Image (cartoon, helix red, strand yellow):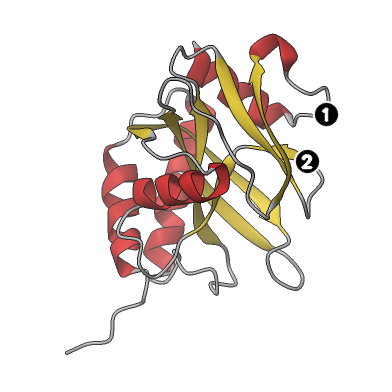
């Protein structure tokens, strides 16, 4: 039997997902093609050890009324971000990664994940010496009514925000994601 990269399940899922995903605009379509080319070139692209860049998944959690988003003040980065992170060997899909990370980082059980990503994003991260490219697939997740999040040890704060209350320091790419998800 041939050895399979440990994140092969996520890799195959990502290829299937991105091959059929309809990008909302030309910029997202260019990223979709870039992600697929990266996946074709790097069979272990879902593994964080992939030095050329690796897949990550995130979930923008919205409340049951779809009026607020849950953001985390990331302890290491000092920035407000959506919930998410690296693929783990036990993950079978990008959606599963996003849901696992959102649940771990928010303490919320019963999140419902939309399986169709609203956006992709490529950015430089400091998860390894010298940094690494993250090829992030964003998802949206709806929290149960009356959800009360509990911050993980990765957060200095975890808070609900309406669109009008978003922190001034929020990165533009996250503002665009909030606009896509709350519309």
Of labels 1 and 2, earlier in sequence is 2
Characterize the local packing of mark 1: few (<14), some (14-19) or many (20 or more) Cα atoms within 10 angstroms.
Answer: few
In the rendered view, tell whether residue 181 sits above or below residue 59. above
In the rendered view, tell whether residue 56 sits above or below residue 109. below
Q: Position of residue 180 (x, y in %)?
A: 51, 19
Q: Position of residue 125 (x, y in %)?
A: 70, 56
Identify the residue at image location x=35%, y=61%.
91
* Residue named by callout 1: 169
Identify the residue at image location x=47%, y=39%.
108
In the rendered view, tell whether residue 20 sits above or below residue 77. above
Q: Position of residue 95 (x, y in %)?
A: 36, 45
**Residue 79 image label:** 2
Q: Are marks 1 and 2 in contact (CB under 8 Å)?
A: yes
Identify the residue at image location x=72%, y=27%.
172
* Label 1: which secondary element: loop
| Residue in front for this viewpoint, 175 or 133 | 175
């Amino acid at each position: 039997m041939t050895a399979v990269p440990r994140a092969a399940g996520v890799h195959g899922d990502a290829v299937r997902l991105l091959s059929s995903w309809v990008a909302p605009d030309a910029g997202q379509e260019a990223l979709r093609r870039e992600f697929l080319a990266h996946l074709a070139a790097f069979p272990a692209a879902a593994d964080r050890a992939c030095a050329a860049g690796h897949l990550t998944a995130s979930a923008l959690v919205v409340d049951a009324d779809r009026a607020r988003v849950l953001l985390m003040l990331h302890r290491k980065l000092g920035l407000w971000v959506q919930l998410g992170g690296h693929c783990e060997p036990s993950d079978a899909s990008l959606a599963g990664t996003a849901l696992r990370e959102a649940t771990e980082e928010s303490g919320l059980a019963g999140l419902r994940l939309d399986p169709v990503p609203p956006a992709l994003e490529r950015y430089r991260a400091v998860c390894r010496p010298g940094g690494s490219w993250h090829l992030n697939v964003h998802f949206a997740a709806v929290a149960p009514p009356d959800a009360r999040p509990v911050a993980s040890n990765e957060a200095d704060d975890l808070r609900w925000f309406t669109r009008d209350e978003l922190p001034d320091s929020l990165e533009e790419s996250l503002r665009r994601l909030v606009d896509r998800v709350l519309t």
